[in-house]
Amino acid sequence: MISLPKQNNYQVALDEAWAALRSRPAAELEQLGAEPLGGERWSLPVLKARFELDRQRGTVEVAGVGAASVWWSILALHYLQARVPVAAARRWISFEEIPAARGYAAPYRGRVIGLFCGTVGRTRESLLSAAAGQGAEVAGEGEATVELQVFPLVPLRIVWYGGDEELPPGATFLYGDNVAGILAVEDIVVCAERVVARLRGKPW
């Protein structure tokens, strides 16, 4: 699976991802939750939005909004490269439990968990309000738990714990245990970052 570029070479990553997607059979795209719009155009649910991908033009747009950012574009294209059929998830796991994630644990805690807890995850109310805006469902773990459908086969569960006088709020991001068969570890990190950005009200 292609990973996100390490030297800001986004255009190369996009070109490679589009080349792979253009040769992908329609039936395999449908297994990943994409829906045909006619011709080479496809629709893909992402959080509460819908991405419209045009394989002929090589564009990714958020319906009713405009062009998706390079990060979301690459993530969507990489998601649609997942090998099918995708194994069913059996349980929730943390990022640290994902194979090959060990080397990314420290950056992940800072770039994802730290930023989340320092912004939209400061309070239960701010989390629930932001999550509702992204189509989340409320689950029942911790002091607050929300479940987001990032891509059709990539759910994300956020378990939030309130702090006290000595400890700040904390959170655990949980994934289906099949996630590493859908996205590369680098993509999972960037995906979590982008979800936090959306929860903070940042644009696509």
Image (cartoon, rainbow, N blue to C red):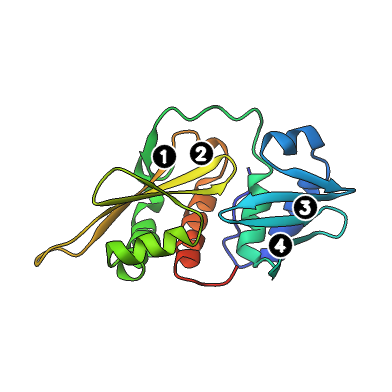
Q: Which residue is drawn at the image coordinates 49% and 62% (left, top)?
A: 133
- State how far apart marks 4 and 3 are (Cα): 19 Å
Q: Are marks 3 and 2 in contact (CB under 8 Å)?
A: no
User: Which of pointers 4 and 2 indicates the residue nearer the eye?
Assistant: 4
Q: Which residue is mark 2?
A: 180
Task: State whether residue 111 is above or below residue 47.
Answer: below
Q: Are marks 1 and 3 in contact (CB under 8 Å)?
A: no
SS assignment at label 3: helix
Among the two numbered marks 1 and 3 on one chain, the one whose residue lies closer to the N terminus = 3
SS assignment at label 2: helix
The disc at residue 18 is 3
Among the two numbered marks 4 and 3 on one chain, the one whose residue lies closer to the N terminus = 3
The disc at residue 42 is none
Q: Position of residue 171 (x, y in %)?
A: 29, 54
Q: Are marks 4 and 3 in contact (CB under 8 Å)?
A: no
Crowdedness of circle 2 by 10 Å Cα count: few (<14), some, many (20+)? some
- State how far apart marks 3 and 2 are (Cα): 21 Å
Q: Identify which amino acid the numbered label 2 is placed on.
A: Ala
Please indicate whether residue 125 sits to the left or right of residue 19 in the image: left
Q: Farthest residue toward the left? A: 165
- State how far apart marks 1 and 4 are (Cα): 32 Å
The disc at residue 63 is 4
Q: Which residue is mark 1?
A: 98
Crowdedness of circle 4 by 10 Å Cα count: few (<14), some, many (20+)? some
Q: Which residue is drawn at the image coordinates 25% and 58% (left, top)?
A: 170
